[in-house]
Image: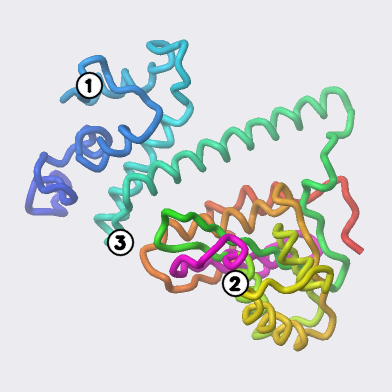
Amino acid sequence: MRKRHMAKEAQCARCNSGTESINNVLFQCPLARLVWAHSAIPTPQGGILDNSLYSNLFHALNVEKEYPKDDVQSDLVPWLLWRLWKSRNEFLFQGKDYEAMSILQKAKEDAEEWRERATCEKSEVETEKTSTPLKLNPKQVWKPSPPTWLKCNSDGAWHKDRANCGLGWICKNNKGKLIWAGARAVPRLGSCIETEAEALKWAAETVVRFGYIKVIFESDSLNLIKMLNGEDQFWPILQPTLQAIYQLLSQIPEVLLRFNPRGANKAADRIAKETFTFMSNVPKLYSVEPNWLKYHVRNNISLYGEPDG
């Protein structure tokens, strides 16, 4: 930053100890060291990352050759480097300060998305070569709604060791195009199913506010859907939330509630997990796909299944 005449001090703004450099940001800053320590990437034999950027990059990018028998997750390395650099920029220019585990989790999600995309593209190429339709499990693929209907998928992200949990939902038309999506971090609730119920309630609140009249709501919580459809008794702890959902759904002229397997609910799941990176509990609404969601929105559309009837 000092070289670009954007800062007076040459020190790292995050740790205030080392001189800011690419090597410091990616390897030597205490936050970077903590991220690498929590990852499955082995440190050099000496146990300390070198003062040389080139030595550190050589080690990180060749770790699979150095430890061929270990599960080192070498494909995670580029995403760790990217997330460390991105978190530095967000810290400097937006005031966002992420924890090491949050950076590591985002890198793992990036790597997983990349693997899924590569697998999907490989399958598409093989399909074109053989002229054989790609076989997909219809139960694990998001299906568009019938014409004139919207489909709203919701999900909750909950972990017993986190202070917050995440609510996510996404509303799409019968072409699979995003209409609205919502992401919100809330103080941790008592259980996963309570989080799922809150996510569905928030989705219903927003849909009612926008005045949509034909909506299919889907959740990957089978117990929740059974309770709302009268197929199972209310759990006492969920009763206030479920009654609020009923009251909201009664304001929508035509509405359906359906269970959707987790594999077909990836977009909502991705939104809910994104909230773990939020610095506040202010809800966020999207009418355009954010970059981190594009793959899941477009990949979840079934090219082979018929719309839900």
Identify the image quadrant of residue 47.
top left
Q: Are marks 1 and 3 in contact (CB under 8 Å)?
A: no
Instruction: Classify the position of the C terminus by image quarter.
Output: bottom right
Q: Residue at x 27, y 55 (%)?
A: 91
Question: Vertical placement of 61 versus 156: above or below?
Answer: above
Q: Secondary structure at mark 1?
A: loop
* Residue type, numbered disc 3: Gln
N-term-proximal mark, 2 vs 3: 3
Q: Which mark is residue 198?
A: 2
Q: Which residue is mark 3?
A: 94
176 drawn magenta: yes
Amino acid carrying mark 2 in the image = Glu
Report helix, strand or loop for mark 2. helix
Amino acid beneath label 1? Gly
Residue that badge 1 annotates: 47
Give the CA distance from mark 2 to mark 3. 29 Å
| 183 w.r.t. 253: above or below | above
| Label whose residue precedes the other's in the sequence (1 or 3) | 1
Region in magenta: 168-195
